[in-house]
Amino acid sequence: MADIINLLPDNIANQIAAGEVIQRPASAVKELLENAVDAGATEIQLIIKDAGKELVQVIDNGGGMSETDARMCFERHATSKIQSIEDLFQIRTMGFRGEALASIAAVSQVELKSRKKGVDLGTYIEIDNSRVNKQEPCQTAEGTNIAMKNLFFNVPARRNFLKSNTAEMRHIVDEFIRVAMAFPQLQFSLVSNNQQLFYLEKGSLKQRIVAILGQHYNSRLVNVKESTDYMNVYGFVGKPETAKKTRGDQFFFVNNRFIKSPYLHHAVMSAFADIIPADSFPLYVLFIDVNPEHVDINVHPTKQEIKFDDEKVMYAFIQATVKHALAQFSVTPTLDFDLDPNIQSLDAVSKPFTAQQKEDSTQSPLYKSFTQANQAHMIDKSSSSSNLRHWKDLYEKTPAAPEEKYTVSAYSEEEPETRPAVTYESQPHATASVIDERWQDTPTDQKVPVQVHQQYILSQIKSGFILIDQHAAHERILYERYMRALQETPIATQQSLFPQSLQLLPADAVMITEMLPELQSLGYELEPFGNNTFVVRGTPADLQGGNDQATIEGLLEQFKHFSELKLNRREQLIRSMARNNAIPAGKVLSSREMQNIIDELFACSMPNVAPGGKFTFISFKLTDLARMFERDRG
């Protein structure tokens, strides 16, 4: 029988491996930037075209490569970072597997120019689908210039899987920021479609944070620094007023490598507990220096998920370090008692304390119990016996007043003039059926809905009643309203008397720039103001005025959530706005507001479900209720 197991050709093996390492243009950006850092570069330039689909180019002034190294770097598992198995436990470089360049060459067209310092000529290599098409000497600057073109040209399914340019560019900016934040002593720049987005000079960590996230953070950062024999933690956290509704200002670095750790994130969140809202996220840029022997970074191909040998120690130390920093800089809240002005008018304050009053007060048992030794727990029998004699009377039942009348109502205290009241005489055997009969006698136009736990709306129908989720119902109403606005008549804009400036993260600024036409149709008027800043000149007329920064941040957070689904940008935006602006659970509604929600919900084309598929209401029939209570209605 013939053998059936064959060794895969290198180009096929590389293409399979590339599926894990290079998932999108941002993956290639990360690998190329980290290679430039490992090469000892002090100036690194990133050039992007068409969100990385057409071109990802990294130019550095590092050590460069010889002719042999330039060719060998594209082979699988070829690396200069490790030589033996022991080196795996002492990794300080960003890369070490030797898979990145081989994976990039397997799914794109690569051009490499590299020259070592002190050498007259460099090396030019052209690779297409893992095959070397050209290798020759060339004139080039010291360092390495590598260009990745036409990503996934030979894997159409993977290229079609890529998201919009806005989403892909946001991921690229995220990766660029993470590398640039980890190495503030290096100069970085980012150019996209011939437009410079970042130019970051060498400087301190605080200068790098301010340059990336915005000048308004300059006076709102708290220094964090603690050292032990096991680990060192340093960096900055933002003051409570910098907390946002959106994620993105959170950075953890272990040995200068960016990581994602929900466990350590929870440690920082617990340190900020009670000083920021529960749905907000604090700013932090924290670096952890720990012996590589205590860390396993070879967990995931992206090397952003790592394992510690003792996570509980890490958690406790980071939580204590952040708490100490907040307390040291007086950021933690203090008790602030405001004096009630009415106290000043009391007799005890405004009138003098006479000698007779002083003598009377010093003779009281209470005064003696606090001023004389060993008297704090003594009970004066002579004064207390008369007061305690009838203590059993406190537990005797008070006879009910006969023929007392009560008013029964399940309605909000708002709008009492429209609230139907049911009055009946108190009787020993009064039951719910008596109340129900009175309810049946109430005119139909007065059967207003009832809010249950400030989350659901109870409304009577002919066959029983329905229970409406106020948030889901309002989300459906807003969704269809916004859909009509984009397709038919735009929503009117309420101009702001005092326009607000909106400072966004660089990745969020890229995302919202491409959404401006749709936002304008939905009633928002935003104007770019440079440096990731926008001016909010108007908001939807049907939206309650308030904190525009928090509103748009919430919109962006919802948009990021829906971007994980396979929805077009317009659908993502409409769903995001509907969910963000819908009436939240816990909001008290008047009878008129509840009735408006009911009327508008059943005027929708699909009233029974919210855009995400959640039910908006549940109906209960009288026959079902009777069966539940085991009533015999025959």
Image (tube, grey):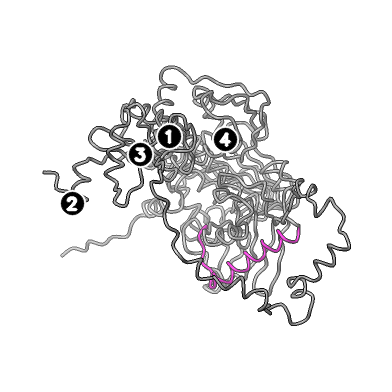
* SS state under label 1: helix
Kind of residue at disc 3:
Leu
Mark number, residue 306: none
Foreground mark, 4 or 3, reads 3
Q: Is residue 559 visible?
A: no
Q: CA distance from mark 4 to mark 1?
A: 20 Å
> Which stretch did the figure color magenta?
304-329
> Quadrant where the C terminus lies?
top left
Q: Is residue 138 visible?
A: yes
Q: CA distance from mark 3 to mark 1?
A: 26 Å
Residue picked out by circle 3: 458
Mark number, residue 575: 1
Tags 4 and 1 touching, CB below 8 Å: no
Q: CA distance from mark 2 to mark 4?
A: 61 Å
Residue picked out by circle 4: 510
Kind of residue at disc 2:
Glu
* SS state under label 2: loop
Residue 464 part of the magenta-drawn span: no
